[in-house]
Amino acid sequence: MDLASFERSAAMVDSSSMFDEMLSLDGVRTRSSRCVYCKGSKMLCGKDRCSVLARFYSMNRAKTMMDRTEMDGASPPSVFIGRTGYPKVAIGPMIPPFHGDTSLMDTPERWVGLSIDNIIDFRSNLVRGMHYVDVGDVESPNKMVAQTRELAMARNPPDISAVFSKKPFGRLTVNDDVQPFGPSAPLSRFDVSNFRLDNRIEKAFFDTDLLSRDAIVSLYGNGSLVSQIQKAFSVGAFGVGKRRRFVPTRWSITAVDSQLGLHLLETTKTSPYINEYRTYETQSLDNRWVIIMMPTSWRYELIEAWYPKTAWNPYGDKIAIMGDHEFYDGRKDYASIGGCYYAARLAVNELLHREGRQAGVSILRESHPGYILPVGVWNVRENVRAALRAEPRTFR
């Protein structure tokens, strides 16, 4: 089945019965009687759009995927490593029910400018296959382990045929660190065909004396996308021999952002200061970003303001503000605001590295009511990058 055929079949699903079903699922369950009275038509919550309906429509499309125990499609390529139950975690492919060039579905570097509805629409088509392993079993003879690793190292969308032991279940899964995805199902087996490994990642994989940090930095320097590196890192493709491990996707995203940011900071901290004050600005997904650079030694802060009726302040009546920071010597504990801190730090250091300059940086993020669902930490990295590609306002 191709994408057009899938969309036609999804449109035939009975939306009234589907809506009743989706309201009972975790993550779509309403928390206020206002939702019952509103039914997505009056916007009583104050949001620009209804997050319940956004999830419903995404899962309405996915309904055709949930009544089967077999699936055939072209993975973007994409894998997911869970964290629940660590160190015994679920690993496996992410599969849409259609073929063709699906690479957009797992390349967040290409998502700037898309709407939340666009992103939810294609990400909800990804079914997560699950096979449980210990995180240390990266060299297990089990075929599904090897194929999951190969999929994460692929350079093109492979064809996948999967057989599940149960029908896909669940909901649209959203998280502030990880991109949204659709239902999940335990795997009996899956086969991968018609793919090529990324030569750069394959070389790092076979070098069992290369530290994972050095592999990450080398691949980044050779032009690999951050999202590609994060996938390969999550399946234990890098590092010294027996120390390799599966890394939950949520952790691998932040680990790679953090390592690359620290690598670039080594140069930033020894570079001359910028010559002026600068401000950069952009807006996306009803988020407003302002980046302020100052002619000082390295120091950095990220401050987020979540307006009422937004993803992480849905029932508040005041703006919720949080932030974290570091000075020249960096920080030793994990940032309280999570992975977004490291994603933004990487983005600003990319610019300073290109310019051979050093600066103090303050990033201000406002999330407004149109940001109805979290879409992942890529939103921070890629929009700060986008802001820094524009000409700044300068002050002396």
Image (cartoon, helix red, strand yellow):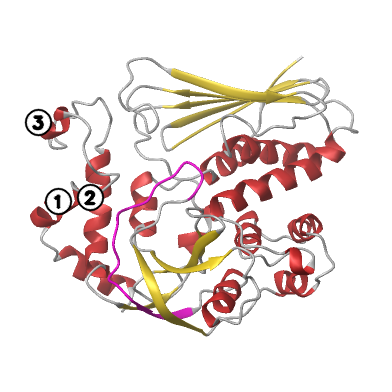
Looking at the picture, how far across and down is residue 322, in whole percent?
Answer: 53, 22
Location of residue 218 (image quadrant): bottom right
Q: Secondary structure at mark 2?
A: helix
Q: Mark 2 to mark 1: distance in Å?
A: 6 Å
At 9% from the left and 56% from the top, the residue drawn is 17
What span is in magenta?
159-178
Q: Label for residue 56?
A: 2
* Front residue of this view, candidates 268 and 272: 268
* Front residue of this view, candidates 249 and 244: 244
Q: Earlier in the sequence, mark 3 or mark 1?
A: 1
* Front residue of this view, candidates 119 and 131: 131
Neighbour tally class for label 2: few under 14, some 14-19, many 20 plus, Cα within 10 Å = many
Q: In this image, 175 relative to 52: left or right? A: right
Q: Earlier in the sequence, mark 3 or mark 2?
A: 3
Q: Where does the N terminus fall, quadrant-wise?
A: bottom left
Task: Tell me if I can see residue 361 in this picture.
Answer: no
Looking at the picture, how far across and down is residue 310, in whole percent?
Answer: 36, 29
Q: In this image, 81 relative to 228: left or right? A: left
Location of residue 285 (image quadrant): top left
Looking at the picture, how far across and down is residue 48, in whole percent?
Answer: 28, 31
Q: In this image, 8 relative to 276: left or right? A: left
Q: Label for residue 37?
A: 3
Neighbour tally class for label 3: few under 14, some 14-19, many 20 plus, Cα within 10 Å = few
Amino acid at pointer 1: Phe
Q: Label for residue 19?
A: 1
Q: Mark 3 to mark 1: distance in Å?
A: 15 Å
* Front residue of this view, candidates 3 and 314: 314
At 60% from the left and 37% from the top, the residue drawn is 384
Amino acid at pointer 2: Phe
Compared with 72, 126 (above or below) is: above
Confirm or deny contact between disc 3 and disc 1 (CB under 8 A).
no
